[in-house]
Amino acid sequence: MQRKPIILIMTSRDEFDNVSQKLAAAVRAIGTHNVVVMSDDKYGAVAKRSTLERLMDSRNEYQYLLEKKDRGVLRDKLRLKKFSKRVRRIGNMLKRFHPEYILCMTPYAHHCASEAKRKLKFTTKIIYLMQSFTLPKRGVGEDTDVFIVENQDVKSEMVRLGIRPKNIMTMGLPFDAVPKTEEEIATAKQELGLPRSKTIFVNMRSKKDLMSVMSLLLDQGHIATIAVNCDNQKLKQEIGNMALTASVPIIFVPAKEKAEDFLAVCDIAVTDFDPSVIYKSFKLGIPVILFTRDEHAQQDIQYLVTRGLALRAREDMDIVGLVYKLLQTELASDLAANGKKWVEFSSLENIANFLATYIAL
């Protein structure tokens, strides 16, 4: 039997919504390719994480170093590391699987693939799927053959920097969600243990920000039921005690894979910069309030706000006023309509079809 061509997906622990596995499943369903997904536990250090891996996990510090004009800043930080183990493992993956190309899903995965290509001089093509709404300050390089970007503005900026238009695909982000009818929402709420009243979905990865946001919302009394996406047991107990004192109904999302079920029946999403939650909210027609202290997300947030796709809470206290505004005015409908229109032609299936036909193009 003839061997199916293989796509190698490289990802890392900082990806959103387990999207690499979902994209791999979508490509396999087409039937033309096999897909191998390799995370940083496979091509990174096993016994001990490297300095680069620790910086990537911290996000902000590594991004800061990448944005420096002087590359020596990053080189000095990592001068004792030659990356030989990571490069060797990526080279071994290529020898083992002989993939048609490498698809990078995160900045760290893209960095590692590009570094390996420079050092090993292999010819396997690299595709980078950027999960942002604006162009990152770093990430555009000669080692990458094709970029998949969210919108035309990112493409235009990349063309201005010298990237050929034919090497930039504007395809949105691979986060899908199917809107429900009012009847389906009512049934789903009952199955999830939610009342029929208004529901706010809260998704904050920072413990400090989550406690701050919940404290403010609970202080308003019973304006809505709150569905909290949190898997930290100690934090859940603290929030639960706060809710009990305030006599406000809250429900915790029981597992990560259930988060989308809760989001789909909510009326407002309050989240940090999580592209998966933001994009799914657009598809579901749910207005989004964005709040984060991460300075590197501000460019993307500003982009969404200026296009009428989301609201921005500059301080945690602003969230309360924005929630009331969405509950009491037509602004929620306007944001929902704008979001649906923005993602109308974007889907995980479209990206999977492109990946399956890329080499033949």
Image: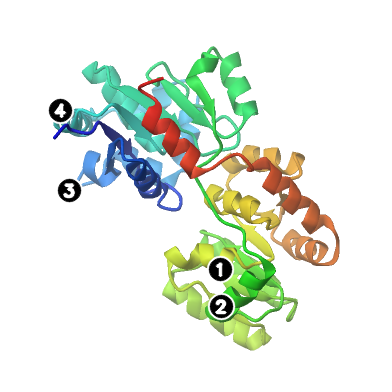
Q: Name the residue nearer the viewer: 35 or 58.
A: 35
Residue count near mark 1 (Cα–Cα under 10 Å), binned few <14, some 14–19, many ≥20: many
Q: Name the residue nearer the viewer: 2 or 289.
A: 2
Mark 3 → mark 1, Cα distance in angstroms:
38 Å
Q: Which of marks 2 and 4 is nearer the N terminus?
A: 4
Q: Which of marks 1 and 2 is nearer the N terminus?
A: 2
Residue count near mark 2 (Cα–Cα under 10 Å), binned few <14, some 14–19, many ≥20: some
Which residue bears the numbered disc 4? 95
* Residue found at the very far right of the displayed protein: 329
Mark 3 → mark 4, Cα distance in angstroms:
23 Å
Q: Name the residue nearer the viewer: 184 or 85.
A: 184
- Percent x, y for residue 300? 63, 39
The amino acid on which the numbered mark 3 sits, given as a three-letter code, is: Ala
Q: Which of marks 3 and 1 is nearer the N terminus?
A: 3
Q: Which of marks 4 and 1 is nearer the N terminus?
A: 4
The amino acid on which the numbered mark 1 sits, given as a three-letter code, is: Phe
Q: Which of marks 3 and 4 is in front?
A: 4
Q: Are marks 2 and 3 in contact (CB under 8 Å)?
A: no
Give the structural element (helix, strand or loop) at label 3.
loop
* Residue 249 occupies quadrant: bottom right
Mark 1 → mark 2, Cα distance in angstroms:
10 Å
Which residue bears the numbered disc 1? 262
Q: Nearer the viewer, mark 1 or mark 2?
A: 1
- Percent x, y for residue 335? 75, 51
Up the image or down, 231 lies above or below 280; here it is below
* Residue found at the very far front of the displayed protein: 1
Q: Which of marks 2 and 4 is in front?
A: 4
The amino acid on which the numbered mark 4 sits, given as a three-letter code, is: Lys
